[in-house]
Image (cartoon, helix red, strand yellow):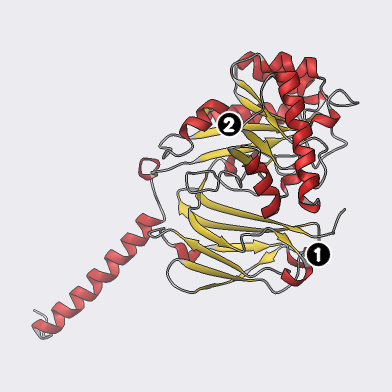
Amino acid sequence: MSSLPVTLRIQKFLTRFVFIMSVLANYHAMNINASEIDDYGIITLMYHRFDESKYPSTNIMIKEFENHLDSINKNGFTFISAVDFINNFSSTHSQKKVLLTIDDGFTSFYESAWPILQKNKIPFILFVNTREVGSNGYMNWDQIKEIAKEEFVHIGNHGHSHEYLADMNKAEVVNDIKIASDLFEKELGYNSPFFSYPFGEYSLETKSVVNEFGFKFAFGQHSGVIDSTKDPLELPRFPINEKYGEQKRFEQLLKTLPFKFKNIVPEEKYLAEQNNPPKVLIEFYENINNLKNITCYSNEENKWRQTKANFIDDNNLELLLEGKFITERGRINCSLNAGNGYWRWLGMQFVIAEIKD
């Protein structure tokens, strides 16, 4: 029998017990099962061109696109329609869901991807910028009307000019969206409740105009998973192209989960010189497991680097950018390992005033 006093043995036992339980708790938190995920959110994908390899930043080869559709099915996702999205936006999503969006209405979509989606009745939203309709490389109104007849298809508004709305004054933004909305009414008999910001860029003023026109949902190009906590006029999407559509990366994308937050400062995503770099503060919801293991990266000074982060308290994170955004768009991506291959993902995109490619 041990010669240690009983009280000391008890203390040692309790210390070991607490340590083991702590390890087990951390292990459990970092190794969630699918049955324990209470909200998968809605993964929204953005495509543009198909089989147009001379535009790699907006193109996906059709074989790769077919692989994506196959992966979505094999991983147990349901493709949802625009109507499903509207009806279930405020819900908790206990099942895996994907929303397909295609921007610009290029002819290559109509010729290469549309036959596949039509054959399999896969729902999607096609965002059309009306100035280019019928011009070289773009679908015409007859083609748009043809696909719009299908119940699983919705045509969304992408503005008229596809110019940088965030750089326009309010009157110019109003005029641009009004022209597009009037053409929607004339050609399709309705204006969509969905809007896609050209280049994913918007300012508070742009957003207010979109709201004034009665749009219920507006999509950017910052990455992340949609859930009911997201601002419906600042919805994230995962842009897919030749670089970011590679199959291994795509499979990882399908393992992303919503990163729920209450607020992000600054609210204004259009940065003037005096506000660059921005002072970013994220207020997260309570009870996010292992939140302090979050990792963020930004493209400040046009170099992707890990961003210094400081927790002000348990749920408020301050990001300390050391350099300015010097390209047209400033990006910050934050991720958190949720276990078993799942990652919580939060992306932000800032528009830098008067910097254009």
Q: Nearer the viewer, residue 329 or 148?
A: 148
Residue at the image position 40 percent from the left and 44 percent from the top: 37
Q: Position of residue 349 (x, y in %)?
A: 68, 55
* Left or right of 1 in this view: 148: right
Q: Nearer the viewer, mark 1 or mark 2?
A: 1
Residue positioned 56% across, 43% down in the render: 232
Q: Is residue 76 left or right of residue 100?
A: left
- At label 1, the amino acid type is Ile
Residues under numbered marks 1 and 2 in contact, where contact means CB atoms less than 8 Å apart: no
Q: Is residue 216 above or below residue 304?
A: above
**Residue beneath the point at 56% across and 60% down:** 264
Q: Quadrant of residue 118?
A: top right
Mark 1 residue crowding within 10 angstroms, few (<14) / some (14–19) / many (20+): some
Q: Amino acid at mark 2?
A: Ser
Please give the residue where the numbered disc 2 appears in the rendered image. 71
State the separation of the CA atoms marked 1 and 2.
37 Å
Q: Where does residue 124 sit, x and y in percent of width and height?
A: 63, 26
Q: Is residue 248 visible?
A: no
**What is the quadrant of residue 347 in the picture?**
bottom right
Of the image marks 1 and 2, the number of the one nearer the N terminus? 2
Q: Picture coordinates of residue 7 (x, y %)?
A: 11, 83
- Which residue is drawn at the image coordinates 48% and 41% (left, top)? 41
Percent from the top left, x then y, of residue 237?
63, 43
Reading the image, the residue beneath label 1 is 326
